[in-house]
């Protein structure tokens, strides 16, 4: 069945919830870059017995549209209703609701998520951009920044249970929240986490000196406090602390570990409402499905 998780283990998946997932909002434009959204969202809704709200955004500016534009808007609306009709036939066992959002998606989708009290937003890949546009935030990034709940970017069209999860952690609350949600999305998965330790600019030191450095001591203390947070995955290995930049450290572990879900907190600076630069970079070319946690 469309959107059915195919278990690769000997028994049924067991879900141990930290915060019950009752409503999932999935935003799709029904294009190939969103092909994994409905399937993954439906599978998770079925797993958690949650309500699934499918949203498609049609941006219109009534005061400025001409007759040709109005005709295009009618065509888009009719196409959306037909796509939803097909989804409803495939997902008859799910509590399914359909919404057409009018206006900029980066505004309307977070608003609808708040309206439906969504516990998770599922998005597809962003639209490829021209070089001159890469400095601006993508719609995907703006939706994620404006959302109050975690955001899952569905990348893999093959809908199967997550078995290998890699967390890029800063030991901040958003990282803990991301792993807590991931433990609900990936019951039975193997969890690993890594922390990129930033050294002073230009600093280099032998490995034995690094282990005794003030930076490592502070990171180990933060890790100890982090691991005491309730609701982290039960089988989460002690996060590895590796000196280096976030990009190089995580890319090496991704290549080595081959996760099917990467987990990251939404911010890397002081402002929890701002999407961190590394989260933005990773979202533009995710190596697999990606979960962006938000501070609770």
Image (cartoon, rainbow, N blue to C red):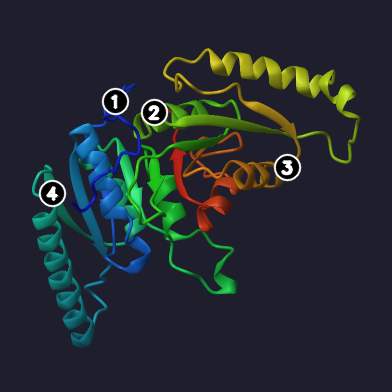
Residue nearest the observer in this picture, 47 or 13: 13
- Report helix, strand or loop for mark 3: loop
In this view, the mark in front (4 or 2) = 2
On residue 97, the disc is 4
Q: Is the Cβ of the residue at disc 1 closer than 8 Å to that at disc 2?
A: yes
Lower sequence index among marks 4 and 2: 4
Residue nearest the observer in this picture, 288 or 126: 288
Q: Position of residue 87 (x, y in %)?
A: 15, 58
Q: CA distance from mark 3 to mark 1?
A: 36 Å
Q: Is the Cβ of the residue at disc 4 closer than 8 Å to that at disc 2?
A: no
Residue nearest the observer in this picture, 93 or 68: 93
Give neighbour class at mark 1: few <14, some 14-19, many 20+ (Cα, 10 Å): few
On residue 245, the disc is 3
Report the residue that reaches farthest toward the bottom. Answer: 68
Compared to 89, does 161 lie above or below? above
How many discs mark residues in the rendered view?
4
Q: CA distance from mark 4 to mark 2?
A: 29 Å
Task: Residue under label 2, please give it.
Answer: 188
* Residue name at image x 40 percent, y 28 percent: 183
* Residue name at image x 60 percent, y 48 percent: 277
């Amino acid at each position: 069945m469309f959107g059915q998780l195919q278990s690769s283990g000997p028994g049924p998946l067991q879900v141990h919830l930290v915060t019950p997932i009752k409503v999932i909002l999935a935003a799709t434009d029904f294009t190939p870059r969103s092909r994994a959204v409905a399937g993954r969202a439906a599978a998770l809704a079925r797993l958690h017995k949650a309500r699934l709200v499918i949203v498609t955004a049609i941006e219109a500016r009534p005061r400025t549209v001409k007759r040709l534009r109005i005709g295009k808007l009618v065509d888009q609306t009719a196409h959306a209703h037909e796509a939803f009709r097909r989804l409803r036939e495939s997902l008859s066992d799910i509590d399914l609701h359909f919404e057409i959002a009018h206006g900029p998606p980066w505004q309307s989708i977070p608003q609808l998520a708040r309206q439906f009290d969504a516990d998770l937003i599922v998005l597809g890949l962003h639209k490829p951009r021209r070089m001159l546009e890469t400095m601006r935030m993508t719609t995907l990034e703006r939706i994620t920044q404006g959302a109050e709940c975690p955001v899952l970017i569905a990348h893999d069209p093959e809908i199967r249970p997550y078995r290998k999860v890699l967390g890029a952690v800063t030991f901040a609350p958003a990282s803990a929240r991301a792993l807590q949600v991931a433990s609900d999305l990936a019951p039975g998965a193997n969890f690993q986490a890594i922390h990129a330790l930033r050294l002073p600019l230009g600093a280099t030191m032998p490995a034995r000196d690094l282990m005794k450095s003030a930076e490592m001591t502070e990171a180990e203390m933060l890790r100890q406090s982090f691991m005491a947070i309730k609701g982290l995955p039960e089988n989460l290995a002690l996060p590895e602390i590796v000196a280096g930049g976030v990009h190089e450290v995580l890319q090496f572990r991704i290549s080595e570990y081959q996760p099917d879900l990467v987990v990251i907190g939404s911010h890397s600076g002081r402002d929890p409402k701002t999407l961190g630069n590394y989260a933005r970079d990773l979202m533009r070319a995710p190596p697999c499905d990606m979960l962006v946690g938000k501070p609770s």
